[in-house]
Amino acid sequence: MGFRDFCTTHVFLRGKPISFAGRAYLDEIYGSQARNTVLRTSRQVEKTTLLANRIIYDVVRHPGRRVLFVCPRREQAQLFSNTRLLPTIQGSPLIRRYLMGGRRCRIQVMNMTFANGSEVHIRAAYQSADSSRGLSVDALFLDEFQDLAPGCLPVLQETMSHSEVKRVWIAGTPKLIDNHLEQVFALSTGNEWKVPCEKCQAEFVLNERVIALEGLACPQCKSTLDSRTGHWVPRNLGAKWGEGFSVNHLMIPWMSIEEVLERQMTYDPAQFKNECLGLPTALGEHVITREELLACCTNRPMAKSWSEVKKAANIIMVAGVDWGGGSHSRTVITVGYPAEDGKFHICFLQRLHAHEEPSKVLEMVASICRQFRVSFVAADGGGNGHVYNRLLAGKLHGFADIFSIHYSSAESEPVPDGVLWKWTVNRSRAIGSVFARFKEKLNLLPRVQDCESFLDEFTCVVAEYDDYKRNIKFRHPETQFDDALHATTYAQLVAVRTIRKLSRFA
């Protein structure tokens, strides 16, 4: 019995037989006979489920088979064992009887020995592969490979040195082009899912080019594309290493185009490319160009008050404030309004120079908020913001909700903090989302001659990869300012939050 047939017959997920409906792209993956297989995928595309199914298939079909599963962290390893492997074993009467025999005791989570002599060892290798030394196995399964310790693959492969099987499955979500996941994928056949256009007969890989508001569309003739009609096409037909498959959100049946578009609107470009399209990025892809910003400039002059913005009813004005401090740092305020079409119209930007007295700066910010009838203010909550935000709340007398923004590597929903709302946001994601929305022309600026002096405060930002945290961070040269970027980031946070509320009640 083949792998796919075994799964449809004996594997149950949440009490129901596993289904391949709408998943034609899985047929060739489940049917792969290659000694080495790599899956380069988006998030949440059932890759870990596939690895768990394959492990169970191997240990059931081959008594005495020894398997090593490796992921970055111990918590992930325990989660894989407790939520993937064990439920699948216990959920199938045949698999449970064959592997567990008559035992009722709980097997070890990290070192499983089964009734037929098969073994599964589960390890973590974020810092190094040392925890796997001393093991002797037949098959190696690596999940979230992009986050495993660099250079760990040869060490892990040595655990199979005495085996005649030596089978390797690798899965992960790409980050940078020079990541080890991308290096392995480049050695493989690199299969891509190509979808034909019925009208013009061209074929397209599922990437940003085929995304349209109504669904997937042919970039040439704009006809609708059906991802279910696709087929695998290898990039490297003569590859000797093994087979590779690229799976993303545009292929899976449970992800709607609306969900994809929402992610494209709110994720930064690198995150959307990595986690939704399953594609690697190069450093610098975050950075916005001057030409891209100029394309977002409208013919509207910079507004001076609410009356100059728009006459239509139900406009909700928001403001973002990046507080200055000391003799060099300026305060910048961004004012705009979110529209029901998802766009954020920036209608006012102003710098308040560092030499101004703090009390005068506060009064000027409060005056601007009153002039534009601002309903929501999002302001830097660190440094001087800890004091300034509360003073601003006193000057506005409660007619605007004030969100105190705190950059972090984590994020959470806003929580009450006295007269303020404290909002912890992921710094890279929040800033990257500003770039993403400008690139998609979802953030609009006033006419060029009025906002041109602010554009350099966006284009000066560069992206760097943090080897320790293994993520991308933003920085700017010390000789240049980026205050307008942060003020706009804060304003966009409350604008997008408002857009989501508007869409729910539309």
Image (cartoon, rainbow, N blue to C red):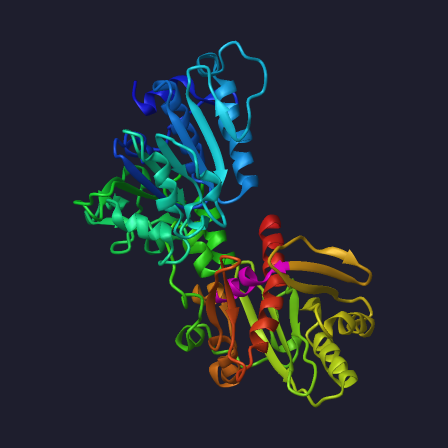
Which quarter of the picture shows residue 63? Answer: top left
Which quarter of the picture shows residue 137? Answer: top left
Q: Quadrant of the N terminus?
A: top left
Number of dots carrying numbers: 0
Residue at the bottom extreme, as displayed: 355
> Measured from the top left, where is residue 48 in percent x and y?
44, 36
> Measured from the top left, where is residue 356 in percent x and y?
72, 89
Helix, strand or loop for the magenta stretch, by majority: helix
Q: Is residue 432 magenta?
A: yes
Question: Is residue 188 depicted above or below 79 in this figure?
Answer: below
- Look at 22% across and 48% down and name the residue there: 235
Question: Is residue 495 depicted above or below 1 in this figure?
Answer: below
Question: Is residue 474 depicted above or below 109 in this figure?
Answer: below
Residue 13 in view here: no
Q: Is residue 309 magenta?
A: no
Residue 127 in view here: yes
Residue at the top extreme, as displayed: 102
Q: Which residues are magenta?
A: 425-435
Horizontal side, residue 212 vs residue 503: left or right: left
Q: Nearer the viewer, residue 226 or 247?
A: 247
Q: Nearer the viewer, residue 387 or 414?
A: 387
Q: Nearer the viewer, residue 423 or 326?
A: 326
> Measured from the top left, where is residue 361 in percent x and y?
73, 83
- Look at 56% across and 73% down and name the residue there: 485
> Measured from the top left, where is residue 118 in percent x and y?
41, 21
Residue at the front extreme, as displayed: 134
